Image: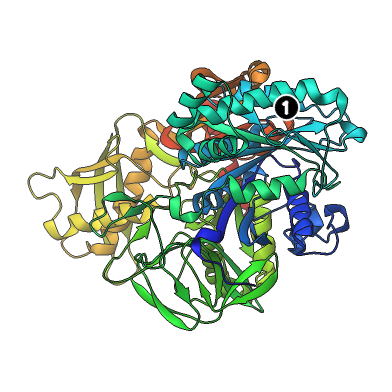
Amino acid sequence: MNEYTTDKLRNVAVVGHQGSGKTSLVEALLYNSGATNRLGRIEEKNTVSDWDEDEKARGLSLSTSLVPIEFEGFKINVLDTPGYTDFQGDLKNAIRVADSVVVVVDAVSGVEVGTQLAWEYARVYQQPIIVVINKMDRENANFEGALSSLQESFPEYKFVPVMIPIGKEHDFKGVVNLLTMKAYYDAGAQRSDLPSDMEEAATAAHLTLVEAAAEAKDTLIEKYFSEGDLTRDEIREGMRAAARDHTLNTVPVFVTSGTHNIGTVPLLEALTVYVSPPSERRFQFIKPDESTDYHYPPQSDDGPLAAYIFKTTTDRFVGTLTYFRIFSGTIHSDHRYFNATQNVEERFGALMTMRGKEQLPEPVLHAGDIGVVAKLNHTKTGDTFSTKDDHLRVMPPKFPEPLYQVAVVPRTQADTSKMGVILTGLCDADPTLQWRLDPAVKQTILEGMGEMHVSIAISRAEALGVGLDIEMPKVPYRETIMQQGTATYRHKKQTGGAGQFGEVTLRLEPNTGNGYEFKSAIVGGAISGPFVPSIDKGIQSLLDHGVIAGYPVVDVRAVVVDGKEHPVDSKDIAFQIAGREAFKLAFQEAKPALLEPMMHVEVTVPEEMMGDILGDLNTRRARVQGMDTESAKSVITAQVPLSEMMRYGNELRSMTGGRGIYTMKFDHYDQVPQHIAQDIINAAVKAAEEA
């Protein structure tokens, strides 16, 4: 691949709802640039960007693919992102390292939940947006309908068609370029005269384009008001300025069919013109004192090194591949660079860029470029390479809390020994994936954004040599008390020699929010001082295992109020046993209760589905906190028990046809209703008897 300096680089994240045709569109762009000699097709499992075996098997993108495209002296680093909402971590990181976001919208479906999710991320990271209305060849394709859907969903933005379609559905033949007022049939490499029946529509759309271009610059708006028109170069200048400035909220709109390769050459040309070069992009970074600031352009090879790691993959044969975006400075093959996040130096071997799975060697990568290096030892997704002196760290995205969890069980002893290392590696590569040992339920928990996300992680662990089975995770309940309770227990054991004796009277009190506390209220020396800690030790041996259902005990104050000892037979073990058993008896007298984790949940669904979703949440013991409407979407906020949300993502997807999304994070513990708690206790007792 040729060497490209900063001014000849363009970085775009191609985003959109699952099934909007992103991967097929990227295939058409590759084909028209000459990088491939045939159009890859998802159904034929031969696309450049969906090359992973899991992607081929499932027929959808599961991670971001880097696809560099060389066109007319430019290198366009295309990041083909997954549209499935489980993989929004990949989506966020791709948007973070791009310089413009291309939102692909299905000409039939219009704006969908994945469109809105990607749009919100682009807005948060202050990215300019270009819209491509794709699949104009489909039955019921409607360019105007899709445009209206965009305007209704994002009313603060102005959508300006740069291209309009010639025909639709099976008659979709090409596009009209509203700047040149020429027709471009098929892929669009050659210009032709306008169809006579489109002159009126094209003229009206051209006027909208001119007005948008004029509004982008003061000099242009003044000329437009005084003369009533702009030259072609001025229109191009204005639209370039509008497309590159996220604050103007002006969105150029293109129209294509990726699978039929229609309208794709004009889009390629637009990516070189309407997307900012990296030198115009500012980025947020963290300084050594943990304060944040923005690095403003111009960024160049001479600037301080700042290379952000946005993706990591691990292959048992190739090893680790680390994808990075250079925001400033340069990176050379066979050099050492400082990881400012981990405070460690790493050796970079051979540099490369990737086109899907194809590795293309690069001796040097300049400011603004995206590259890959193999076999780094300490680097994770989200890290920044800088210098020890500058110590810059690019601000990583904030990732959502996991929504779906499974308990993983290694299949063999060998899998047990490798499981921790492999799961840690997968979670280091994907910040939305987490694993932990949960002592409360005695399970290894793997958490992700949804069933598909976790399933892919299990599959990748197996490919790396660890066999894992999955189980439904147990809910981490807690045990506590609701009132005072007092009990006395005497431990007496005579074995022929020295005996054991200890008697403890214990009072338990609720200690809400303060965990376990132990106090002594012994008067008159009923129990000698050295034996009081023994009582505490005996109680603490019970706390992790519970009294009524085997769950950890929390928020209890234990007070020793009386007791007896024997001058010969009393010893440490006797008072440990007496304290433990007195605690059990007093716990039963103190109105024991189970506590369950309550989650703060926000559900976003189409407005017409709000009633059904509210009804379903009520069956889950939800406490609805609020309801809002945002751009024809309803947002329901509620507190819901974790036990009722274990598989909510699957059910929400089913109820809404994939149009609903939700977020969930832990809020607090609350008491389980008595009738539900009794079933949990009975099940725990039965399981203990069978064990």
Which residue appears at 65% of the width and 33% of the height? 113
Q: Which residue is mark 1?
A: 146
Q: Quadrant of the N terminus?
A: bottom right
Q: Is residue 463 left or right of residue 220?
A: right
- Quadrant holding the C terminus: bottom right
Residue 4 image offset from top left, x and y in percent: 56, 67
660 to 42, vertically: above or below: above
Question: Is residue 383 or residue 189 the one in the foreground?
Answer: 189
Q: Is residue 445 above or below residue 411?
A: above
- In which quadrant of the rendered view does residue 345 lie? bottom left
Q: Secondary structure at mark 1?
A: helix
Observer-nearest of 258 and 682: 258
Instruction: Answer yes or no: is residue 60 visible.
Output: no
Residue 437: percent from left, percent from top = 49, 59
Q: Would you identify the image quadrant in which residue 608 lies?
A: top right
Q: How is the image coloured?
A: rainbow
Q: Is residue 394 above or below residue 259?
A: below
Percent position of residue 38, x then y: 86, 61
Instruction: Tell me the residue at 7%/46% (across/down).
Output: 524
Asked if residue 131 lies left or right of residue 186, the reply is left
Q: Residues within 10 Å of mark 1 (few under 14, many from 20)?
A: many
Residue 200 is situated, as x and y percent measured from the top left of the image, at 78, 20
Q: Amino acid at mark 1?
A: Ala
**Residue 543 appears in the rendering:** yes
Drawn side of residue 51 relative to residue 168, left or right = left
